[in-house]
Amino acid sequence: MSILLVDDNPDITHLVSKFLKSKGYENIVANNSTEGFKKILNEEFDYVFLDIHMPELSGLDIIQKLEEEKKLENLKIVIFSAHNFTPHQIEELLKKDGIHGYLKKPIQLSKLLATITN
């Protein structure tokens, strides 16, 4: 299984990457949104963990661009964010083809693992 982690916080991506590797999951890290967007477009991943609040392109911008390019429905994106979304906002995001989950920061590693093993 190949996983892409897109988050502008290297502390988070380092921790999550190390955890996933310890569980046997190959993963790649992108610590800026532009690099993450390019990787999503040009490489194949089983899951993409996407932060919402990043400089340059937000996670929501990336999702919108993927929708415009008709690429979103072929992906499995799990959003993670410290932002307090309302239940309605989360529900609307999860209705989009390609969005497979939402994890609130700070991320509970057991929930992250459950997301990719279920």
Image (spheres, rainbow, N blue to C red):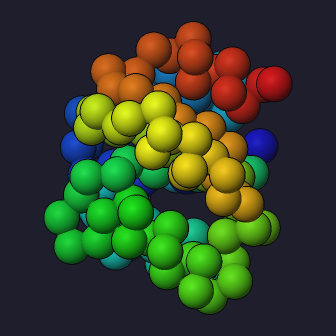
Could you tell me residue 58's position as x and y percent? 30, 64
| Residue closest to the eye, 114 or 42 | 114
- Relative horizontal placement of residue 1, taking residue 100 as reference (left or right): right
**Residue 82 appears anywhere in the view:** yes
Q: Residue at 27% of width from left, 37% of height from top?
A: 83
The single residue placed furthest to the front in the displayed view is 88
Residue 41, quarter of picture: bottom right
Q: Residue at 29% of width from left, 33% of height from top?
A: 84
Could you tell me residue 116's position as x and y percent? 72, 31
Could you tell me residue 109's position as x and y percent? 50, 16
| Quadrant housing the N terminus | top right
**Residue 43 appears anywhere in the view:** no
| Quadrant housing the C terminus | top right
- Relative horizontal placement of residue 79, taking residue 55 as reference (left or right): right
Query: Can you say whether 54 is above or below 24 in the image?
Result: below
| Residue closest to the eye, 100 or 19 | 100
The single residue placed furthest to the bottom in the displayed view is 69
Could you tell me residue 72's position as x and y percent? 67, 70
Q: Residue at 55% of width from left, 51% of height from top?
A: 93
- Relative horizontal placement of residue 23, taking residue 109 as reference (left or right): right
Query: Can you say whether 25 is above or below 50 in the image?
Result: above
Query: Can you say whether 88 is above or below 103 in the image?
Result: below
Q: Residue at 66% of width from left, 59% of height from top?
A: 96
